[in-house]
């Protein structure tokens, strides 16, 4: 039986109920949430929501939105519901158990924005964790949805010119852009650098459904100073719920 505990992100502004085993939400969820250009009244989809971290971070930054979360693991959907309750946002949230390949789960053209922290390592690409929750979160189980399946679902349920914000490994950025194909445009990329002078290990990518405008590569965010502390720009996002914007 898994054990759970309560953690926080955004300087304590968002409470999360998470399994002690498996991948635990933190930096990635906060950074991708900062790219969602939501406004009051919008409906946001957190696809592959896990414990609800990314979507709830959007709610902390933008008041008056509605959130729907989807995850294939019942245990994590229960955690997301508990996380929403811990923050007092349960009336504005709905979490669904299901597979992104099931076209009957979510209505088409229904969401203004989507946020996604997809499995980084698809089946056969890395070691296999013995923990079933972690294995599923990493995309390591046979028959798991592929990256193109996630994009297909998002394209189907977003409103025209709705936005999708991803966080992914920098060395897999080409795979994500290829999956977005011609159905998304206005692509913006923010590299995330561990320290100044080091290569990016993550990228945040935002795109718009049915847009044809060209891609933009932004300056990106250096996360840590030489002494390991957060940089001022990273701290603005991680503690003050700041947004990733174009310069």
Image (cartoon, helix red, strand yellow):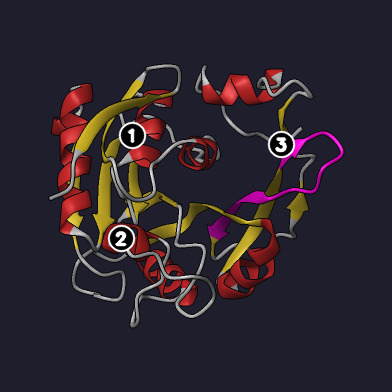
Q: Residue at x 42, y 62 (%)?
A: 138
Contact check, label 1 and label 3, Cβ < 8 Å: no
Q: Which residue is mark 3?
A: 246
Q: Position of residue 222 (x, y in %)?
A: 74, 33
- Kindly indicate the quadrant of the structure image that contains residue 18: top left
Local secondary structure at mark 3: loop
Residue 131 bears which disc, if any? 2
Question: Which of pointers 2 and 1 indicates the residue nearer the eye?
Answer: 2
Q: Compared to 30, does 191 lie above or below?
A: below
Residue at mark 1 to residue at mark 3: CA–CA distance: 23 Å
Contact check, label 3 and label 2, Cβ < 8 Å: no
Per the picture, the main secondary structure of the magenta-coloured stretch is strand
- Kindly indicate the quadrant of the structure image that contains residue 110: bottom left
Judge left or right: residue 72 versus residue 74.
right
Q: Which residue is mark 1?
A: 56
The segment highlighted magenta reads 193-208
Which comes sooner in the sequence, label 3 or label 2?
2
């Amino acid at each position: 039986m898994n054990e759970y505990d309560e953690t926080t992100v955004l300087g304590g502004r968002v409470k999360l109920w998470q399994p002690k085993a498996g991948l635990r939400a933190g930096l990635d969820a906060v950074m991708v949430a900062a790219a969602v250009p939501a406004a009051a009244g919008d409906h946001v989809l957190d696809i592959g929501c896990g414990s609800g971290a990314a979507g709830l971070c959007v709610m902390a930054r933008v008041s008056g939105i509605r959130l729907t979360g989807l995850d294939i693991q019942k245990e994590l959907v229960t955690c997301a519901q508990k996380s929403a309750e811990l923050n007092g946002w349960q009336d504005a949230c709905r979490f669904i158990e299901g597979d992104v390949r099931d076209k009957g789960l979510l209505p088409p053209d229904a969401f203004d924005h989507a946020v996604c922290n997809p499995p980084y390592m698809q089946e056969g690409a890395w070691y296999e964790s013995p923990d079933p929750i972690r294995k599923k979160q990493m995309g390591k189980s046979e028959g798991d949805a592929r990256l193109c399946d996630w994009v297909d679902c998002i394209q189907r349920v977003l409103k025209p010119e709705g936005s999708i914000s991803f966080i992914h490994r920098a060395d897999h950025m080409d795979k994500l852009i290829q999956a977005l194909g011609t159905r998304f445009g206005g692509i913006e990329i923010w590299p995330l650098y561990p320290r100044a002078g080091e290569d990016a290990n993550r990228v945040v990518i935002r795109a718009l459904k049915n847009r044809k405008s060209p891609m933009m590569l932004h300056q990106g965010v250096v996360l840590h100073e030489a002494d390991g502390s957060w940089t001022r720009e990273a701290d603005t996002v991680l503690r003050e719920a700041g947004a990733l914007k174009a310069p």
